[in-house]
Amino acid sequence: MNHIQIDLNRTLGPINRDIFGGFAEHLGRCIYGGIYEPGSPFADEHGFRTDVLDALRRLRMPVIRYPGGNFVSGYRWRDGVGPREERPARTDLAWGALETNHFGTNEFITFCRKLGTEPYIAVNCGDGDMREARDWVEYCNGTKNTALVNLRREHGYEEPHRVKYWGIGNEVDGPWQIGFKTPEEYARALTEFGKAMRWVDPSIKLLASAVSLWDGDFVERAQLILEQAGDQIDYMALHWYVDNHANDFARFMTVSELIEERLAAYEGLIRALRLDNAIKRPIHIAVDEWNVWYRTHPVFGNDLNNLEEIYNLEDALVVAMHLNAFIRHARSVQMANIAQIVNVIAPIFTRPDGLVLQTIFYPFELYSRTCGQIALDVAWRGDTFSAGDYTGVRTLDVSATYDEQRRQIALYVVNRSETDALETTVSLLDARFAGPARLSVINGPDIKAENTFAAPDQVTLREQEIALDGHTWTAVFEPHSVTALVCPVA
Ligand code: AHR
């Protein structure tokens, strides 16, 4: 028997909805053939695919990061503005592709506004300089009568774009990056980029490229970045991708422990360094690239294949575990961006004649739609399993939120057993269920089930209303499933 106990008084703090952010890079068919495809029967007047926009709207992403990724470390933003026929085509060295620059800053902002999402721009801190970075801020956000602001006006954008989030570089700790930097080099560059960008627009929020190489020098990097630029930084950006290369389901399901370790370690690091350096500015964590990614990874000997990963049910469970972790770490994780949004390691997969919602689409949509504003410190115990480096891992992975206005809770449960339905008592302390409640379950025939054009609904969401009353609900969580219970409480 498993037990989950929810106490509305045990709160972890407000949840920043930016944890449901996304990421779009000039890579493969993410932009071209994904969100932008002029000439497609689905294209609107801007060339954006309306079927993709509709699917993205279901994900309710409050923020989208752009234009890379590795791509940004060789990108010249000026190539992507102004009359399209005058924009130069370039070689993208990060992905060995031809970049037409037909989609650039203004198209991205227009796309974001259509979606109702905040743009988050990463600047080139690879082979780009701080002049280029600060000019980009001015071009986007400036209001004075300067050459750059007038250039934006000439391009048809009278009003400033008011881009709030700016990242300085991408994965600068990785030798695969154009302009890879030692901790000292990055701390120095970041300090100067950040200073100049903030002088152009003091209202912007800055994200430092903190860790992507977790077996590298991430502690030293954090120390140098925060010692030198602690008063400039709003977020330390972390990246990770997880995999099931060993084809070991139980081991894959322990990814929650890895996420906990990384978040807890980084929270501690930020706290210690803020204290040590008397940094007054709050510094948050942004996991601004995360997902499952391994099948189409070039280092594993496949073709690059444009990173068009096809996801299965076990990947959807892992995505749900990430969202549980971000909710449980709501105090520190104030932004997270699933990488990416369309075609490239993404929840949405297009062809010229339509699209498929991949398995990972469903947990993301479910959490984003139902998540309350306050994270609860939920307690749970019961069955455990051991795999890989971890022993005694609870078979259920759980988080819960509270919506004060609606007086309703949302409980999220991932059952990581491949075979067992888990009977569980869910108790409310100091409150009672005041149904009707909505029960949503994501599941499929087996852990390897995928959604394809031929069979698009192998893994989907089922919903039903259930009557709930009293302090305890006895639930049965299906094997290999994600369940959400949204219920009013009194
Ligand atoms: O999202 C794909 C790539 O993964 C990004 O370009 C890079 O930042 C990361 O290594």
Image (cartoon, rainbow, N blue to C red):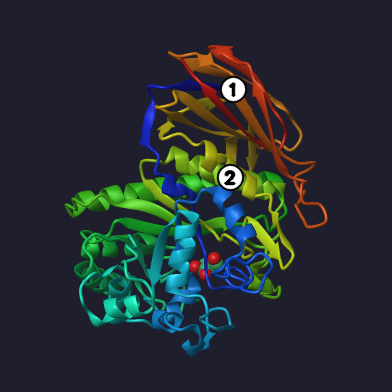
Q: What residue type is labelled 2?
A: Glu
Considering the numbered disc 2 on the image, is that residue within a helix, a strand or a loop?
Answer: helix
Residue 65 drawn above or below residue 460: below
Front-most of 395 and 357? 357
Image location (x, y in percent) of residue 370? 53, 36
Considering the numbered disc 1 on the image, is that residue within a helix, a strand or a loop?
Answer: strand
Image location (x, y in percent) of residue 467? 63, 16
Name the residue at 80% across, 41% down.
445
Measured Cα–Cα span from mark 1 to mark 2: 18 Å
Q: Mark 2 points at which residue?
A: 365
Q: How many labels does the image show?
A: 2
Q: Which amino acid does label 1 sit on?
A: Ala
Q: What is the quadrant of the N terminus in the image? A: top right
Image location (x, y in percent) of residue 84? 49, 83
Q: Quadrant of residue 190?
A: bottom left
Left or right of 215, for residue 181: left
Name the residue at 68% across, 44% down.
250
Q: Mark 1 points at which residue?
A: 437
Q: In which quarter of the image is residue 353?
A: bottom right
Mark 1 Cα within 10 Å, few/some/many (few <14, many 20+)?
Answer: many
- Residue 461 can be seen, yes or no: yes
Question: Which dot marks residue 82?
Answer: none
Of mark 1 and mark 2, the one earlier in the sequence is 2
Residue 394 drawn above or below residue 4: below
Image location (x, y in percent) of residue 111? 49, 63
